Amino acid sequence: MSRGTRIPRRAVAAAAGLLVGALALTACGGGTEKNDGKGGGAAADTNASGAKIAVSAKDGSTDASINDTTVKVTGGKLTKVVMTVAATGAAVPGTLAADGLSWKPDERLERGTQYRIAADAADGKGRPATENVSFTTVSPANSFIGTYTPDHGTTVGVGMPVSFKFDKAISDKKAVQSHITVSSSSGQQVVGHWFGDQRLDFRPQEYWKSGSQVTMKIDLDGVEGANGVFGVQSKTVTFTIGRSQVSTVDVKTQTMTVVRDGSTVKTIPVSTGSAENPTYNGQMVISEKFTQTHMDGSTVGFGGEYDIPDVPHAMRLSTSGTFLHGNYWGSPSVFGSVGTSHGCVGLRDVRGGKGDTPAKWFYDNSLTGDLVIVKGSPDKTIAPDNGLNGWNMDWSEWQAGSAA
């Protein structure tokens, strides 16, 4: 099989309603019947159903798709379809089309699982037909899947890229990337960029246009991403770009200026990283939001320097542990005057996060996908793949990382 091609779909046997033995009409004299042109020979069985049932997965197959299992009928209508997990007998919910011509499961099937389908149908004269099929879906070892962000139906900030993380190393990057398309109603060109063998991000040259809708079409079912390893995803995801909000942290003045749709809406005193542990420079995207989270320095290389179980209003800016968050343990005097953190950006807050504080205001007024830009720090610029921060890469370099 050539790389980047789809798994050939096997023909599906739909041998319902077999012709049963015909009755031969003979004269009583045995072999002395005269052919008078009024019959003679075999007659078709008038009890055979005209309904023909077809199941998309071949009986006995071991590499069936987890996405496109269907039961269809011609020459009649389906009357009952039962799908079960072979090992447990658990029913798989499904929906019969209003016209009675097809049935499909309500959800994607599990990988490496054996299923059974028993389907009944009847033709226009009420004559029944039945089909029974048993098959096993493609195994996890021979397939790959990509988790992605953002989710379908969400509204995100103008900096949110589309980001895939695959559970297997991809060797045929061109095949995989060519079966994922990302487009925007704004008409912006969207280009993919590979970070290693398991991550693929998409973004336009400039931030997304506010109010635009982005559509991601994932057509990986049957695509060979590595030798003998095939994709199993097939779906369309859409999300909306909200208002533009870009907040700039100036380390030299320890302030953050929040600009929404081109106008400054607030300037907030902050406390950034200390001289020993400065905050990264660069454009960072809010990738996650937590009303409260546990921060343990030992998980990010700081040993036992801090362990705070209830950090309020935390917003992730990097994979390595950079957050913009509320700070209730620091003196109010540090905000707007001095960096005291281990690299995060702290805003004044209260324990429990219930007060009317700068941290709560910023949390309530931020979306995942909003941008936080840090400037004036003695530290380096954050790496483009440390979080969803590909905006720190030059456009020509970004394009060079595309396999399409």
Image (spheres, rainbow, N blue to C red):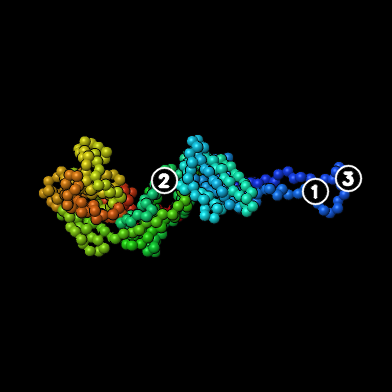
Location of mark 3 (residue): 32
Q: Position of residue 355 (x, y in %)?
A: 17, 49
- Give the number of marks: 3
Query: Viewer-proximal residue, 124 or 291?
Result: 124
Instruction: Give how far apart the Cα atoms at labels 1 and 3 are.
Output: 14 Å
Residue 167 as seen in the image, left or right of residue 332: right
Q: Amino acid at mark 1?
A: Gly
Q: At 49% across and 47% down in the image, what residue appears?
A: 94
Q: Are marks 1 and 3 in contact (CB under 8 Å)?
A: no
Q: Position of residue 101 (x, y in %)?
A: 56, 53
Location of mark 1 (residue): 41
Circle 1 sits in a helix, a strand or a loop, which is it?
Answer: loop
Q: At 16% across and 53% down in the image, what residue appears?
A: 269
Q: Nearer the viewer, mark 1 or mark 2?
A: 1
Location of mark 2 (residue): 166
Q: Nearer the viewer, mark 1 or mark 3?
A: 3
Q: Position of residue 33 (x, y in %)?
A: 87, 47
Q: Amino acid at mark 3?
A: Thr
Q: Position of residue 364 (x, y in %)?
A: 24, 53
Q: Earlier in the sequence, mark 3 or mark 2?
A: 3
**Which quarter of the figure has residue 27?**
top right
Instruction: Give how far apart the Cα atoms at labels 1 and 2 are.
Output: 64 Å
Query: Viewer-proximal residue, 359 or 3?
Result: 359
Residue 380 as seen in the image, left or right of residue 118: left
Residue 234 as seen in the image, left or right of residue 163: right
Q: Residue furthest left?
A: 333
Q: Amino acid at mark 2?
A: Phe
Q: Quadrant of the C terminus?
A: bottom left
Query: Viewer-proximal residue, 58 or 227?
Result: 58
